[in-house]
Image (cartoon, grey):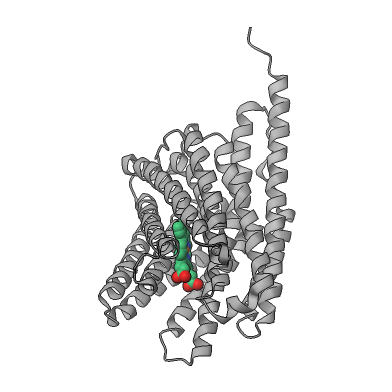
Amino acid sequence: MSAALSFEQAPPLSVPHRFFLTGPLFGVAAGVLVALRGDEVVLSRWSMATFAAVHLVTVGFMLQVMCGALMQFLPVAAGANVWRPRLVAGVVHPSLTLGAVALTAGFLGAGADAMRAAVVLLGAGLTAFVAVTGLGLARSPAIGPTLLLLRSAVAALAVTAGLGVALAAIFAWGAALPLVQLVHLHAAWGLGGWALLLVIAVALLVVPMFQLTPPYPVRFSRGLGLAVAGALAAWTVGVVLDVAALDVVATSFGVGALGAFAVKTLHLQSKRRRKVLDTTVFAWRVGLGCLLVAGAALVALRLPLPALARARLEYLLGVALVAGAFPAMMAGMLYKIVGFIEWLHLQRVMAVPPTMQKVLPDARARWQWRVFTGAVLLLVGGALWPPLARLGGLGFAAACVILELHLISATRLYLRLSAAAALETPATP
Ligand code: HEM
């Protein structure tokens, strides 16, 4: 990957922002659902309330934020031009939004028609997104581990979406497919493939850039990619051919990769050039801590356990990844990325644009981070005493409301300043 960033290729601000402004709303819905039906969520990973909550976060929140970030990030940082970004965002964004609503409604009892709508909308939206970003990445002249990880993440998203559509087809048309195996594959490719690979790829760039740490060593980054690929390959062959021994190989590679990534990032953060601790660093620490908890839960789940302990550990694993690790790191990134891209666009139209700090002050981000961390602790506590999960759901919803309000206020500031700058620019005759 070339070190130089090409800001000339950045898409219009509305492209990433429409995704960023939508994501947290699904986070609010997920939190409210857990507040209402937290007992079912703690009880079993196979309950419909759990599936709905998982997808409100993964498809509703994470996918929106990641699509917006990739549309912004690929041309600038990976030399991968996204074909007609405004048009693509205009198709992908509503498809993902309505698709996530339909999928959740389908899980919550709205019937086969809702699932059919989810298959069409999410299938079409994700096909368009994967095709456009995949083509841009395939044609990119850049080299290096970030590009490889990004390509692998987009490929893993395609596999996840394909498996998700197949699963939804079971609900929608009663397709005769092996449900449990498909869920095992889909969940691993979604969380261990797409989400983990993307977070690692983005971290290689944004952690050194925004947190002023030394860079990740190239061989280490390559090794991470290989370990995740090894884990997914072993898991897939193990599930498809029913070879139990491969489960140990997959767990070793997967836990090794996420553990090494978390420990290395914490280590790099401890060597930051600027010692002032801003909220992004805290948010990442919470996220990385959750990754380590998830790793420990994955190992513990390989032990012979009574049914109740297994269900609670599965809940803990879900909370650590779906409510903790990925949303924490994404919210941390959002505070930096939104401040940065607004500054980037404003400095084209204003002599003195507001700094990133002015667009999204750290004191605001700190509030969001505190509420979010409290919510994750309550959700984790739900593994021991289930009523805490409901409170955690409320906290998660509150943290997402705060995030949304901050993003709205940053967008309004941008609109106000760019409108004022347009008025000041003399019209060309
Ligand atoms: C793209 C990111 C996605 C991620 C990270 C993801 C993640 C997951 C996870 C972790 C599970 C297992 C939940 C549990 O064990 O409690 C699951 C199940 C499922 N997912 Fe997804 N998912 C994604 C996208 C999709 C899409 C696009 C669809 C449909 C179009 C979908 C449909 C399903 C279905 C139907 C199930 C199983 C429900 C059942 O067996 O009753 N997912 N997903």
Q: Nearer the viewer, residue 104 or 358?
A: 104
Q: In this view of the protein, which residue sits in the foreground, 278 or 330?
A: 330
Q: Going by the image, does 400 lie left or right of 226?
A: right
Label count reads 0
In this view, 145 is above or below 3: below
Residue 288 in the image: state x and y as whole percent: 54, 68
- Relative to residue 17, is residue 200 depicted above or below? below
Which residue is located at x 54 percent, y 44 percent?
94
Q: Residue placed at 51% from the left, 34% from the top?
A: 86
Q: Residue at x 34, y 72 (%)?
A: 178
- Residue 215 visible at all: no
- Measured as percent of width and height from the top left, residue 207 is found at 52, 55
Q: Position of residue 270 (x, y in %)?
A: 56, 65
Q: Quadrant of residue 42?
A: bottom right
Residue 212, percent across and down? 55, 53
Nearer-the-camera pick, 412 or 346: 412
